[in-house]
């Protein structure tokens, strides 16, 4: 296939995944319209429960399985992949079971610390955590297969199920945070079922032994690298919940929900890029795909952030009640601005880790730890939290750029242009 045909396929797949990601994101975002029907403090509890689920290493899991699937298909080692999928599937269930028992044992302390009145929400969150482990696993297999058609449908159906169930429970049965989380759970159930069914030809295949040491040398850096990025993307909400009132957290969550939507817009390009670069790296093929994706991400992310700064007050009034407007609109420019370097860093991290350039990983982990420490020190206001996030995201982008062009760019193995 010619370079022009490769690019045409890439943009067609990226376009579909972008449509699916935005549609799924909008449907998930639609849940936040229901904030008008519940108290701000309950909305803050929902945001915190959602943030807990978001801090599950969903991105690392998906990228590990995307990388391993793309590599197995390129090297004709599908049976090794089948054994790995089944083993991790069972292992995640075992870890979840033990962790859930610990959470239920310390339930009282957790509810008091997180300012949660209804334990049902916590129980539902535990089920959400399990599905938040399984959905990215099998979505990663779809991504590695480059089965972007069903990967996109999984996203949209997840969002639709979440919105419909949550709307019924809140509007008809007068549910609060627990009702919203039930919608999240049912959406994940349907998404998991679809992804598991669509990948059955791989995980049902007879397995063959695989080299554990070689696998761990690939998996551990991927988990740590993408885990550090996910922490940078999601951790702020939990720290805000710990240091601010329930109402303030609800207002902050509203601004964060709108600002993080920028990742719905630009993330699909990196998602399509990743398995392609894995495949190219395994076969020692050269590609300039990262540069194209980086430019597209920069344009879309900057334009989206500017649009939020201009239209933010109107969007907040449209989605949320009047009580949210003052605080949400005051922090939104800071939040949207912080998402731009994070979006660009996401492209560079995907490129580096797809090529197995793992020297960047220790720096990412150290930065994530420094970010967590900084949030414990600088939280006198919501804007201070966002300034801290923005500075750390700029540092993240700088680190990724250095390892892309300053270190890996000098390597004779670096791949430049097709």
Image (cartoon, rainbow, N blue to C red):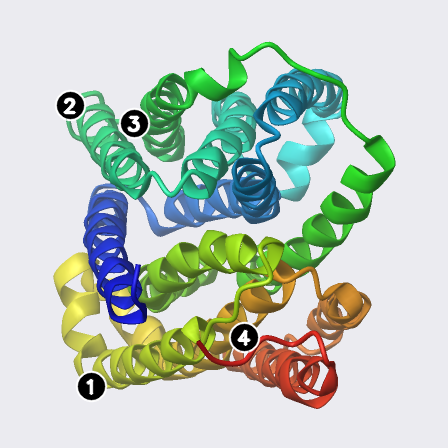
Q: Quadrant of residue 188?
A: top left
- Residue holding disc 2: 172
Q: Position of residue 39 (x, y in %)?
A: 32, 46
- Residue holding disc 1: 310
**Seen in the image, is 314 located left or right of residue 397?**
left
Quadrant containing the N terminus is bottom left
Q: Can the viewer see residue 191 in this picture?
A: yes
Instruction: Pick whichever of labels 4 and 3 is earlier in the sequence.
Output: 3
Q: Position of residue 135 (x, y in %)?
A: 46, 31
Task: Give me the residue at 66% from left, 53% from top.
Answer: 227
Q: Nearer the viewer, mark 1 or mark 3?
A: 1
Mark 2–mark 4 distance (CA, rounded to whole Å): 43 Å
Label 1 SS: helix
Q: Position of residue 109 (x, y in %)?
A: 73, 32
Disc on res. 98? none
**Seen in the image, is 134 located left or right of residue 256?**
right
Q: Are marks 1 and 4 in contact (CB under 8 Å)?
A: no
Q: Are marks 1 and 3 in contact (CB under 8 Å)?
A: no
In front: 34, or 409?
409
Label 4 SS: helix
Disc on res. 345? 4
Q: Quadrant of residue 100?
A: top right
Instruction: Pick whichever of labels 1 and 2 is earlier in the sequence.
Output: 2
Instruction: Pick whichever of labels 1 and 3 is earlier in the sequence.
Output: 3
Q: Can the viewer see residue 239 in this picture?
A: no
Mark 2: give few (<14), some (14-19) or many (20+) Cα within 10 Å. Answer: few
Q: Are marks 1 and 2 in contact (CB under 8 Å)?
A: no
- Residue holding disc 3: 175
Mark 3–mark 2 distance (CA, rounded to whole Å): 8 Å
């Amino acid at each position: 296939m010619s370079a022009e045909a490769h690019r045409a396929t890439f943009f067609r797949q990226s376009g579909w995944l972008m449509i699916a990601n935005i549609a799924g994101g909008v449907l998930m975002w639609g849940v936040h319209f229901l904030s008008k029907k519940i108290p701000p403090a309950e909305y803050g509890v929902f945001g915190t429960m959602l943030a807990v689920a978001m801090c599950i290493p969903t991105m690392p899991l998906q990228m590990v399985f995307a990388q391993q699937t793309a590599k197995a298909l390129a090297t004709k080692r599908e049976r090794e992949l089948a054994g790995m999928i089944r083993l991790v599937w069972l292992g995640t269930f075992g870890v979840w079971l033990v962790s859930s028992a610990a959470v239920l044992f310390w339930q009282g302390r957790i509810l008091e610390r997180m300012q949660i009145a209804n334990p049902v929400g916590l129980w539902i969150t535990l089920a959400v955590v399990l599905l938040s482990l399984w959905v990215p696993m099998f979505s990663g297999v779809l991504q590695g297969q480059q089965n972007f058609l069903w990967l996109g449908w999984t996203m949209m159906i997840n969002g639709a199920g979440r919105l419909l169930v949550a709307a019924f429970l809140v509007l008809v049965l007068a549910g609060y945070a627990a009702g919203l989380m039930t919608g999240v759970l049912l959406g994940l159930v349907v998404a998991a079922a679809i992804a598991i069914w669509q990948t059955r030809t791989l995980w049902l295949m007879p397995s063959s032994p695989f080299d554990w040491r070689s696998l761990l040398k690939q998996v551990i850096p991927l988990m740590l690298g993408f885990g550090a990025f996910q922490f940078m993307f999601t951790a702020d909400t939990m720290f805000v919940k710990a240091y601010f009132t329930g109402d303030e957290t609800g207002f902050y969550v509203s601004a964060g929900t709108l600002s993080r939507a920028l990742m719905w817009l630009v993330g699909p390009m990196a998602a399509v890029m990743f398995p392609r670069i894995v495949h190219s790296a395994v076969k020692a093929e050269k590609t300039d795909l990262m540069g194209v994706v980086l430019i597209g991400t920069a344009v879309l992310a900057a334009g989206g952030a500017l649009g939020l700064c201009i239209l933010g007050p109107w969007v907040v009034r449209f989605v949320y009640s009047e009580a949210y407007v003052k605080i949400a609109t005051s922090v939104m420019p800071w939040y949207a601005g912080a998402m731009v370097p994070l979006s660009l860093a996401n492209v560079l991290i995907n490129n580096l880790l797809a090529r197995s350039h793992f020297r960047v990983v220790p720096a990412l982990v150290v930065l994530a730890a420094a970010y967590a420490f900084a949030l414990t020190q600088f939280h006198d206001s919501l804007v201070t939290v966002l300034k801290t996030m923005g500075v750390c995201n700029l540092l993240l982008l700088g680190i990724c750029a250095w390892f892309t062009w300053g270190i890996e760019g000098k390597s004779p193995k670096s791949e430049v242009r097709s």
